[in-house]
Image: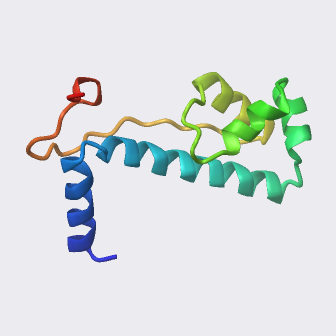
């Protein structure tokens, strides 16, 4: 995808008021994919993952579901620990484009 096409797509989602939602879904998809790959590499089943995390299988399935955005920091910490991984969360400055609104201030 060219930079121009990406910029146009982001502008369209921003105009629709959905850019932050798309970004959140993208981050969750990347996280779910990374967890699935780590589980596969270590031959860890969802049942074993749940046991290691001291949680239920439905919780593990929600964590691995790219569309489920409700993962807590605690759940992510337990999942990374269960796989012997370090969880790194960063806050980065982002350039603000004109018309961007804070997600909690969106017009209904």
| Vertical position of residue 51 compared to residue 20: above or below | above
**In the rendered view of the protein, which quadrant contains the C terminus?**
top left
**92 and 99: which is toward the camera:** 99
Colouring: rainbow
Residue 36 image position (x, y, % from top left): 73, 53
Q: Choose top left, top right, bottom left or bottom right for residue 103.
A: top left
Q: Residue at x 38, y 42 (%)?
A: 21
Residue 24 image position (x, y, % from top left): 43, 42
Q: Choose top left, top right, bottom left or bottom right for residue 62.
A: top right
**In the rendered view of the protein, which quadrant contains the N terminus?**
bottom left
| Vertical position of residue 95 compared to residue 102: above or below | below
Horizontally, is 19 left or right of 76 in the view? left
Q: Residue furthest front?
A: 108
Disc tally is 0
Q: Residue at x 58, y 25 (%)?
A: 73
Q: Residue at x 13, y 47 (%)?
A: 97
| Vertical position of residue 104 compared to residue 64: above or below | above
Residue 32 image position (x, y, % from top left): 63, 48
């Amino acid at each position: 995808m060219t930079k121009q096409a990406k910029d146009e797509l982001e502008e369209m989602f921003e105009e629709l008021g959905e850019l932050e939602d798309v970004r959140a879904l993208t981050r969750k998809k990347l996280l779910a994919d990374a967890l699935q790959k780590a589980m596969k590499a270590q031959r860890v089943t969802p049942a074993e993952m749940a046991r290691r995390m001291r949680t239920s299988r439905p919780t593990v399935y929600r964590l691995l579901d790219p569309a489920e955005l409700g993962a807590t920091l605690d759940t992510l910490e337990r999942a990374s620990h269960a796989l012997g991984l370090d969880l790194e969360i960063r806050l980065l400055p982002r350039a603000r484009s004109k018309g961007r609104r804070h997600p909690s201030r969106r017009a209904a």
